[in-house]
Image (cartoon, rainbow, N blue to C red):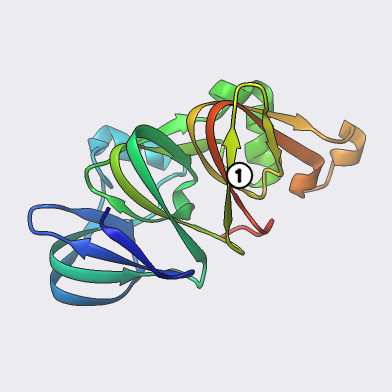
Amino acid sequence: MPFRLLNSRMVEAQVIPGQRLFSQRGAMLAYKGDVSFTPSLTGGQGGVMGMIGRRIANEATPLMSVEGSGTVMFGHGGHHVHVIELTGDTLYVEADRLLAFDGTLQQGTMFMGSQGGVMGMVRGQVTGQGLFTTTLKGHGAVAVMAHGGFIELPITGGRPVVVDPQAYVAHRGEVRNKLSAALGWREVVGRGSGEAFRLELSGQGTVYVQASEEKL
């Protein structure tokens, strides 16, 4: 794992010759060694078509490529940072939550409505969460951001987890999501709070929840 938490809001990455990292542009706080930072249009292994898909999906958070030899310290906006290690599985995360990730991971975009149907579309329009979400797949580490710290909640076959969509950060594993209105439609009209909806995740995996309803 190339990432090491320095404190709850900063992470240090080990940059090795021949290997590449990606991070949000402007997230570099300090570095040591011979390290270069280059704006990245494709952002990982998604290629040009992946870039176009992310732009259409509004999941095109500006990234930079980090290469060379040394150590780099990352942080952004004073947000809390959490490191997730992937071992061949897929992480589903909002693009603006990504602080930095291994260049070995394959980045893509998934249409959340494909799992949530009409309610998945409502999620994007009412709760402020994206209708599309970014995926990272493979072996490597990801540093993600949130307000107020993180908690990892296991999802098992017989015990679905229900979270406030505004507190949702990411999930991994074989997980299905379903968004439903917690109140009647007449009470929901004109409200932007995630409390009007609930996001139910079932299957096998993990969901990452932040201790706040604030957006990044």
Pinpoint residue 51: horizontal percent, then vertical percent.
31, 40
Pinpoint residue 95: horizontal percent, then vertical percent.
45, 48
User: Image quarter for residue 125?
Assistant: top right
- Mark 1: which amino acid? Gln
Pinpoint residue 61: horizontal percent, then vertical percent.
40, 53
> As drawn, is 158 to the left or to the right of 112?
right
Query: Viewer-proximal residue, 192 or 85?
Result: 85
Instruction: Identify the element where label 1 is drawn.
Output: loop
Q: Residue at x 25, y 70 (%)?
A: 72
User: Image quarter for residue 87?
Assistant: top left
188 lies above or below 41: above
Question: Farthest left residue?
Answer: 18
Residue 57: in sight, yes or no?
Answer: no
User: Image quarter for residue 112?
Assistant: top right
> As drawn, is 140 to the left or to the right of 118?
left
Q: Residue at x 23, y 76 (%)?
A: 31
135 lies above or below 192: above
* Crowd rating for badge 1 (residues with CA inside 10 Å; few <14, some 14–19, many 20+): many
The number of callouts visible is 1
Query: Viewer-proximal residue, 199 or 186?
Result: 199
Pinpoint residue 59: horizontal percent, then vertical percent.
44, 44
What residue does disc 1 label? 129
Query: Viewer-proximal residue, 159 or 192?
Result: 159
Q: Residue at x 67, y 49 (%)?
A: 166
